[in-house]
């Protein structure tokens, strides 16, 4: 028989109202009581009735995740991370894919949020980088957290999770330079994503810091797809002055570049080094495996959901009405693999 809130209250030795306060993450409950209730919930495998909880008052317990991203691996890890945090914190999750460039995108997001009675939104790039969309959500007085590339949080008045793409791209490029490469090309992703610009700027900064000339023909506008990597790498390898290394804006592009290199008879890494970004399955399913920057998408997503839920709780609590906005920061870590380094088959985390 399914456990009820009354069963939890009886086992924990508290009132039903106290159990409700713990489930709703109210700050008025002391930690010892919170732990007793949490243990009772776990022991009884109690599952709150979210629909009924939402109907009882103005507070709702459903988050939304809106995204526009062609990278299936990125989206899956984002969903898993947000969902894990929602389950632990007693929230439901609505997943809503959309196109950031469509004319009625703002109306679509507004309608979805109202229809689903959302408590808040997790927004990933490029939606999280679009001022018009953010302004529309703020007008709705709907809590949200943004996942965005960058590191400067001083100008952000809403909760954000920052991913330091620039610094990670700098480290990848510096690694290629340390391997003896001076003719290093860059294949970018979609320009609508700030991550493309951050990674390009990191690449350019590393070249400048090491006194290496930046050649315009080595900087290619691409898309975050395998086909784009294959096409643009082929074009680079047809140049009269061929690059000896290619830094790709993500692993899918890098896998495409590796495919093109092999088709054109280039030995990787003896004749051409190739690096990606994100540490997606693409980086581990190629041969040789790809040097990349490990971006913990699942953890980033979970932290974003946690930040949003905490922000919602603070917003509902008069005691924390003036609490400063919280931010989180992540820097992808360099993983050196065989695609850029001779005589090694092991990952090196620097």
Image: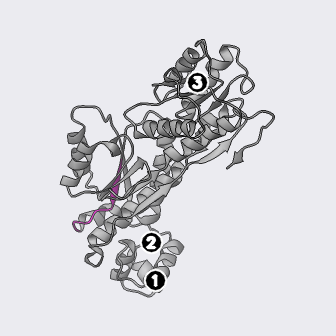
> What numbered label is drawn on residue 256?
3
Residue 350 appears left or right of 252: right
- Residue at 35% x, 71% y: name it: 24
Mark 1 vs 2, N-terminal side: 2
Q: Position of residue 208 (x, y in %)?
A: 54, 37
Circle 2 packing at 10 Å, graded few (<14), some (14-19), many (20+), is few
Tell me the quarter of the picture where residue 229 sits. top right
Question: Farthest bottom residue?
Answer: 13
Secondary element under disc 1, as helix, strand or loop, is helix
Image color mode: one colour
| Residue occupying image coordinates x 40% and y 54% | 152
Taking 182 as reference, is 329 above or below it? below
Find the distance from the CA under tag 1 to the CA under tag 2: 23 Å
Tags 3 and 2 touching, CB below 8 Å: no
Crowdedness near tag 1: few (<14), some (14–19) or many (≥20) residues, C-alpha within 10 Å: few
Q: Reply yes or no: does residue 135 show up in magenta.
A: no
- Res. 31 mark: 1
For mark 2, what is the residue? 3
Per the rendered image, the range of residues in magenta is: 57-65
């Amino acid at each position: 028989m399914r456990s009820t809130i009354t069963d939890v209250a009886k086992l924990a030795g508290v009132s039903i109202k106290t159990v409700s306060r713990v489930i709703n993450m109210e700050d008025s409950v002391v930690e010892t009581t919170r732990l007793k209730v949490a243990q009772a919930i776990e022991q009884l495998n109690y599952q709150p009735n979210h629909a009924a909880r939402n109907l009882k008052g103005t507070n709702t317990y459903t988050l939304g995740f809106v995204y526009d991203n062609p990278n299936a691996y990125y989206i899956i890890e984002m969903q898993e991370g947000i969902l894990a945090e929602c389950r632990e914190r007693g929230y439901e999750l609505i997943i809503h894919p959309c196109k950031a460039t469509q004319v009625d995108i703002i109306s679509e997001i507004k309608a979805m949020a109202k229809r689903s009675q959302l408590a808040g939104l997790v927004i990933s790039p490029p939606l999280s980088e679009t001022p018009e969309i953010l302004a529309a959500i703020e007008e709705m007085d709907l809590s949200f957290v943004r996942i965005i590339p960058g590191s400067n949080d001083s100008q952000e008045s809403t909760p954000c999770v920052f991913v330091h793409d620039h610094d990670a791209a700098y480290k990848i490029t510096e690694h290629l330079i340390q391997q003896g490469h001076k003719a290093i090309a860059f294949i970018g992703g979609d320009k609508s994503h700030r991550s493309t610009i951050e990674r390009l700027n990191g690449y350019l900064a590393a070249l400048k810091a090491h006194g290496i000339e930046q050649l315009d023909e080595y900087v290619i506008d691409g898309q975050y797809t395998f086909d784009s990597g294959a096409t643009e790498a082929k074009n680079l390898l047809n140049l009269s002055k061929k690059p000896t290394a290619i830094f790709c804006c993500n692993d899918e592009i890098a896998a495409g570049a590796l495919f093109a290199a092999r088709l054109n008879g280039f030995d990787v890494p003896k004749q051409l080094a190739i690096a990606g970004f994100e540490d997606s399955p693409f980086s581990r399913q190629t041969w040789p495996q790809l040097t990349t920057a490990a971006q913990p998408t699942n953890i980033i997503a979970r932290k974003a959901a946690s930040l949003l839920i905490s922000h919602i709780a603070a917003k509902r609590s008069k005691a924390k009405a003036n609490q400063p906005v919280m931010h989180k920061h992540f820097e992808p870590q360099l993983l050196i693999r065989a695609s850029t380094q001779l005589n090694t088959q092991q990952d090196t985390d620097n």
